[in-house]
Image: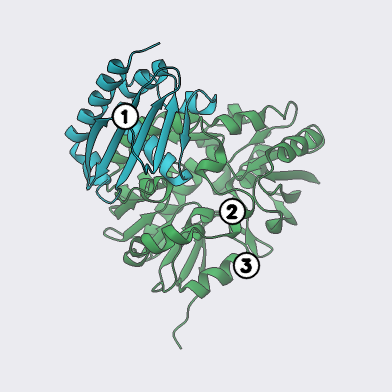
Amino acid sequence: MKQVVSVSLGSTKRDHQVEVEFLGEKFAISRRGTDGDFDRAFALLQELDGRVDALGLGGLDVYIYVGRKRYAIRDGLKLMEAVKHTPAVDGSGLKNTLEREAVYFLARESGLIRAGTRILMVSSMDRFGMAEALSEVGCDMTFGDLIFTAGIPYPIKTVEELEEIANKTVPEMVKMPIHMLYPTGKKQEEQDEAKVRKFASYYHDAEVIAGDFHLIRRYMPDGLNKQVIFTNTTTRGDIEFLTKKGAGCLITTTPVLSGRSFGTNVMEAVLVVLSGKPPAEISPADYLELLHKLNFRPQIIHLWEEK
Amino acid sequence: MAEHCEITESLKVFRDNFNQNERLKKMNRDWDRVIAIKATDIDSLHTLTLRKGDLSLREGASETPDLVVISDSETLADLFYGDVTPTEPYLNGTLKIQGSEDDIIRLDFISLMIWGE
């Protein structure tokens, strides 16, 4: 049995474990939150290093890809230093491939994403692949990075402008403590009420709301009108939350295992084990080949049914 | 050590760059703030006032600033001339900013939008 553990800066309330088989290989997969405690996450990674087959880092990215540039997040690199022996990944390698494929699949096979669909990406600088793919399909994009991260009510409408602004801001933002940029620990269970009120119209005007689930959740207003939520990491509790808010449909890019979809870091760790290669040697083409073998498809859950 | 007039000149450059950037003005039309700039090693106080997307500068203190930017004179001049970004001096404690975390992040973004790569 292969052991994969995701160590997350997120809440322990989301901890979960499953046993599952991929391509004939049995996996025990678990997620262990540390409630935003950086030192605890570091110590846990040190403890698990050399004792499991692969590690995932959750609750923060280590790398952000903007076009062809890769930026390293300082806090993420510090956490990576805890791991000396076991392959460790943050999901960014897979995200670029998996989420692009998910968009192309949905555009091809479902009516949920098509040219002209109004899409709000609450955060896009952390998932540039998804942003590019949605734009390629011809969706009417609103990239909300400035709105929700910086509180600046300026919707970025094109990938070109997103890339230009990212190249100005990301090289410095990655040096900042992660808690200033992303909800960690207990903040993941709370909403930013001021921004929920101020920026509700961006959610209400969109047909699809995409991006990181913790950010989507943090700023989501009441009274949605059956919008589609396109994200990855969700639990049963999240599904209840979305239903209560009025969302119509949930699409997750990672498969649902025992009632929840794990983070991209977990799935990337699984693929690293299956490939048998060190993470640095795995190319997007390798990930793509494995994804096709696994027949990974976006999971669609309808939250609302006409009575 | 920089002189008071150098800080003034750097702030004028910052103000002019902001006001010539139509996109930045549009982004900040909703953000009316008074920002005090205070040097720790010389007697130097300035006030930047952002109203409806226009940034103005005056010498001297403000009684009720929303944000207070505090550092040594050299760092302040470097910062507003765009020779250094605020992140490093903020993280190593050379630069202190008093205000809400949301306002600090927004000010950081504005600075990066002017001086970023």
Residue type, label 2? Lys
Whether residue A58 is situated above or below residue A204 in the rendered picture: above
Q: Name the residue under label 3.
A: A237
At label 3, counting other C-alpha atoms closer than 10 Å, the crowd grade (few under 14, some 14-19, many 20 or more) is few
- Could one spot residue A128 in this view of the protein? no
Q: Residue B4 carries which label?
A: none
Q: Mark 2 or mark 3: which comes first in sequence? A: 2
**Whether label 2 touches label 3, CB < 8 Å:** no
The x and y percentages for residue A66 are 40, 34
Chain in cyan colour: B
Classify 10 Å Cα crowding around label 2: few (below 14), some (14-19), many (20 and above).
Answer: some
Residue A171 appears left or right of A49? left
Pointer 1: what residue?
B46
Mark pair 2, 3: CA separation: 16 Å
Residue A79 appears in which quarter of the rendering? top right
Report the residue marked by disc 2.
A187
Please report, as a chain letter, where disc 2 is located. A
- Residue A118 located left or right of residue A191: left
Image quadrant assignment for residue B73: top left
Of all chains in the rendering, the one displayed in green is: A
Q: In which quarter of the image is residue A65?
A: top left
Q: What residue type is labelled 1?
A: His
Badge 3: chain ID: A
Q: Nearer the viewer, mark 2 or mark 1?
A: 1
Separation of residues labelled 2 and 1 (CA atoms): 36 Å
Q: Would you say the residues marked 2 and 1 are in contact, meaning their CB atoms lie under 8 Å apart?
A: no
Q: Which chain carries label 1?
A: B
